[in-house]
Image (cartoon, grey):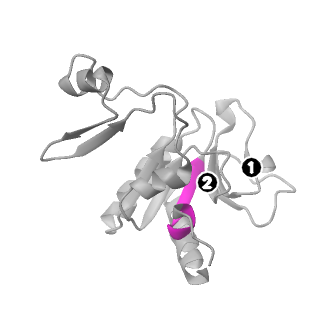
Amino acid sequence: MQQVSPAQARKVLGVIGTSGSGKTTLLEHLLAQLAERGWKVNVIKHSHHDLQFEPQHKDSARLRMAGAAEVMVGSPFRYAIIHELRGAAEPTLDEQLARMSPADLTLLEGFKSYAIDKLEVYRVEAGRAPLYPDDEHVIAVAADHARPEGLRASVAWLDVNQPEQVLAWLLTHLKKTSAQG
């Protein structure tokens, strides 16, 4: 029997786009609307930069810098686990998903190179080429211009300036994928 990876077992959608395209703004809207409907949504944000979670002088940072493999910081409001890779390979998407608690949906910001369903946020004013022409996993584009001629018919074209339209597409897409499997 073939094992199912965490990405296959969960509802996962990548939200991709170049810097300045509005990914985070759109995600904020989608998250607020889904939470209002009672959905539990996780987010994994990928970064190519070093991450700073706490000021260097705080106890948790000092303990991490002293050599702790992981530091958990907890409070009555939230907790965070900071895991130092110390030269080890970056965890795969499946490894990251496996560490997260169950959710109705996991949205990924970034992860452009992964073979997962993706929504691209694209704005002409960002000044960069779109990703959707070369990525068969882009199933929808939220853009600030009309659908281009010759685009695969299977790609949904949405107005990035109408976030409710994007939300409606997402809810329909999730219903469709739930029914399929």
Residue for point 64% across, 58% down: 116
Quadrant hosting residue 125:
top right
Is residue 8 rendered to the left or right of residue 32?
right
Residue for point 58% across, 71% down: 3
* Spot occupied by residue 8 in the image (x, y as percentages of width and height): 57, 67
* Spot occupied by residue 91 in the image (x, y as percentages of width and height): 52, 44
Mark 1, secondary structure of its residue: helix
Mark closer to the observer (1, 2): 1
Residue 162 visible? The answer is no
Q: Residues within 10 Å of mark 1 (few under 14, many from 20)?
A: many
Residue for point 73% across, 51% down: 146
Give amino acid for label 2. Answer: Asp
First to last magenta residue range = 7-15
- Residue 122 vs residue 105, the one in the foreground: 105
Q: Earlier in the sequence, mark 1 or mark 2?
A: 1
Q: Residue furthest top?
A: 57
Q: CA distance from mark 1 to mark 2?
A: 15 Å
Give amino acid for label 1. Answer: Tyr
Q: Quadrant of the N terminus?
A: bottom right
Residue 19 visible? The answer is yes
Q: Quadrant of the C terminus?
A: bottom right
Is residue 170 rendered to the left or right of residue 53?
right
* Spot occupied by residue 172 in the image (x, y as percentages of width and height): 55, 73
Which label was assigned to residue 132? 1
Q: Is residue 101 above or below residue 95?
A: below
* Residue denoted by label 2: 159
Q: Is residue 12 magenta?
A: yes
- Residue 141 vs residue 45, the one in the foreground: 45
- Residue 46 vs residue 168, the one in the foreground: 46
